[in-house]
Image (cartoon, rainbow, N blue to C red):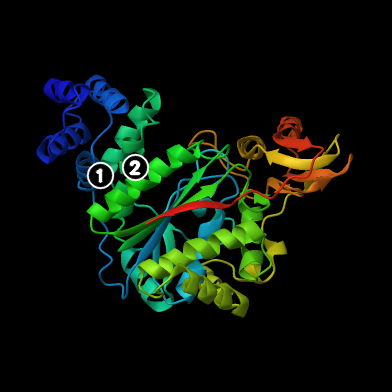
Amino acid sequence: MVDLIQKKKQKQELSQEEIDWLIRGYARQEIPEYQMSAFLMAVCFTGMTAQERLFLTQAMVRSGETIDLSQIEGIKVDKHSTGGVGDKTSLILGPLVAAAGVPVAKMSGRGLGFTGGTLDKLEAIDGMKVEIAMKDFIQQVNDIKLSIIGQSQDLAPADKYLYALRDVTATVESIPLIASSIMSKKLAAGADAIVLDVKFGNGAFMKTLDDARELARTMVEIGKDAGKKTAALLTDMNQPLGFAIGNALEVKEAIETLKGNGPKDLQELVLRLGAWMLVLAGKSETPEAAYDTLSGILDSGAALSTFKEFVKRQGGDVSQIDDPAKLPTARQTVPVISDQEGFVKSIGAQSIGVAAMTIGAGRATKEDSIDMAVGIVLLKKVGDRIAKGDALALLHVNGQDCQEALRMSRSAYCIQEAPVSAPTLIYDIIS
């Protein structure tokens, strides 16, 4: 192990055998944490070559089970988002792409931070089961082209051990380590092609466009070298996506979007991501043609019908989809009032996300429980005109002390006198 630390410190390339030995030994607890910490820090300072990144990703895949989706007909396309505030795209994207005939066999996780993950949001629907047997998962995708379930704890377990160590050794922000962490779980989950939504900005893990572009290129390269068709969209997270932040609130917004009445930025992102999923699945020759196809499906109501069938098949109460007012609803709304007039220049997405977490919409620790009904609904976004006394947002609360959330939400809004153009949503596509 000392030799490998020394090699990486001197910017020498490690072989596949050396990286396999390293990951296998750490997963078996044969390599102590202090040595692995030194290795991770060396990677942070000296980076990794493309070959090393692929070998690291593949070694983490081999540390646990892999999912065999070969019994599902067609080209299976998965989508991964690097995370943001108000990101409920999977709830819309899955049924939309499935309605176009592309199988979506998705494994998702729970949220830690601003709001719940995809599984938490789905569980806002009464009776919704996100843990089902693999044979039923495969059968459901063959039947209706869509299932979303919890990610197996046995997928890439070495990544879990490494991430826990990175979290306490200030080695999280290393692009080779981030890319191999994400891609190891995607490759282990068995999809044939992968579309990545790499977010940047105030409310994202990657704060700058340049860092996000480097991460996207690294992940696309790993996917390509692993034999998977892969594309990445670089998308803005300098303000929350859509209007709703919070689990049941985001489900309601997803339903409205499936009806064709959703926020423009959310609908546009879903259509653009979905277009690339259709291209990688061989259903469309160009993203432009695929975009038009998906727009027609959204307008027809077919995606909403697929979502209802998906909910029904996994035990959820479909009447809540027909009447979203039946979903968990907070007892009280509290307005966030502007003390200025002008135009919204920016909205600190991270501050809005943390504000939502403080009233129970997310988890500060894994042990925290989520209140499905609470959250924040934005009433004004970047570019909108504001009058003094206007409500900028509504806090949805169940009797919680919301003074801190009010303060954070109000301070998240930056207002200026001059008009502001609406921000760019998608900055680049790497494929």
Q: Position of residue 38 (x, y in %)?
A: 25, 21
Q: Residue at x 42, y 77 (%)?
A: 101
Residue type, mark 1 in image: Thr
Give the percent coordinates (x, y) of residue 393.
76, 45
Placement of the C terminus among the 4 image quadrants:
bottom left
Mark 2 lies on a secondary structure that is: helix
User: As rendered, which of 333 and 50 lies closer to the eye?
Assistant: 50
Label 2 with label 1: CB-CB less than 8 Å: yes
Residue in the picture at 52% in, 70% down: 291
How far across and down, in percent of the image, does residue 104 sit? 41, 67
> Which residue has dot 1 on it?
57
Is residue 253 left or right of 163 when viewed as pictured?
A: right
**Residue 132 can be seen, yes or no:** no
**Vertical placement of residue 259 versus 195, above or below:** below
- 369 or 253: which is nearer to us? 253
Residue drawn at x 61%, y 58% is: 266
Front residue of 318 and 183: 183
Point out residue 23 in the picture as x, y percentages from the top left corner.
Answer: 20, 36
Identity, as a three-letter code, of the amino acid under mark 2: Ala
Residue drawn at (36%, 70%) of the image: 281
Q: Which residue is mark 2?
A: 179
N-terminal-most mark, 2 or 1: 1
Query: Callout 2: 10 Å neighbours few (<14), some, many (20+)?
Result: many
State how many labels appear.
Answer: 2
Q: CA distance from mark 2 to mark 1?
A: 8 Å
In the foreground, 334 or 286? 286
Displayed quadrant of residue 190: bottom left
